[in-house]
Image: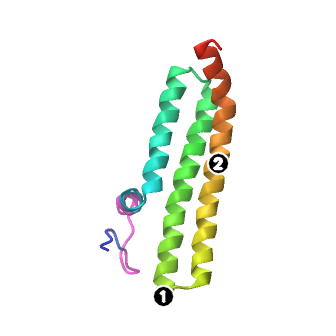
């Protein structure tokens, strides 16, 4: 596994450098985690549905916030899994539980977001299709 953007303590931090590091981390998560790609696809569907169903601005802002939270949780889950793998390279039940709990946090955020999305979108879908 080759990681780009590694910083060392003596390296001077710059705004551009830290931005590149952050984008490298997001890119790593995108390329290594299928769930991140699934969340991005769902985010695209939500944004398109928001446009088609003419959601209110505050509803769109809530959707954008929830999308950001789910994606951020997925990145943090990747970080936790990498740290656990680094610290405990051999199988450990504790390491497995740490990874499971981290994945559980992502699941809770995604389910919460989906439920809020249903509350926002179901009435608009009913009106849109005239049911």
Indicate left or right for 120 with 7 as reference.
Answer: right
118 and 15: which is toward the camera: 118
Q: How many marks?
A: 2
Indicate left or right for 28 with 60 as reference.
Answer: left
Report whether residue 44 is seen: yes
What range of the chain is rendered magenta? 7-24
Indicate left or right for 52 with 128 as reference.
Answer: left
Q: Which residue is mark 1?
A: 90
Q: Quadrant of residue 130?
A: top right
The disc label shown at residue 120, or none: none
Please say whether residue 111 is one of the residues in the magenta stretch. Answer: no
For the point 64% across and 15% down, the residue is: 127
Q: Which residue is mark 2?
A: 111
Q: Is residue 106 above or below residue 1?
A: above
C-alpha distance separating marks 1 and 2: 32 Å
Q: Is residue 131 above or below residue 119?
A: above
For the point 50% across and 32% down, the residue is: 47
Where's residue 61, x and y in %?
Answer: 60, 34
Q: Is residue 38 above or below residue 116?
A: below
Please say whether residue 20 is one of the residues in the magenta stretch. Answer: yes
Where's residue 77, x and y in %?
Answer: 54, 64
| Element under disc 1 | loop
């Amino acid at each position: 596994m080759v990681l780009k953007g590694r910083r060392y303590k003596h390296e001077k931090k710059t705004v551009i450098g830290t931005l590149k590091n952050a984008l490298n981390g997001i890119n790593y998560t995108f390329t290594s985690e299928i769930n991140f790609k699934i969340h991005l696809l769902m985010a695209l569907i939500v944004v398109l549905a928001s446009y088609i169903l003419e959601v209110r601005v505050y509803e769109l802002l809530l959707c954008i916030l929830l999308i950001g939270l789910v994606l951020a949780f997925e990145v943090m889950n990747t970080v936790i899994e990498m740290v656990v793998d680094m610290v405990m390279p051999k199988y450990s039940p504790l390491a497995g539980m740490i990874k499971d709990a981290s994945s559980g946090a992502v699941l809770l955020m995604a389910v919460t977001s989906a439920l809020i999305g249903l509350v926002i979108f179901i009435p608009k879908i009913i009106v849109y299709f005239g049911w």
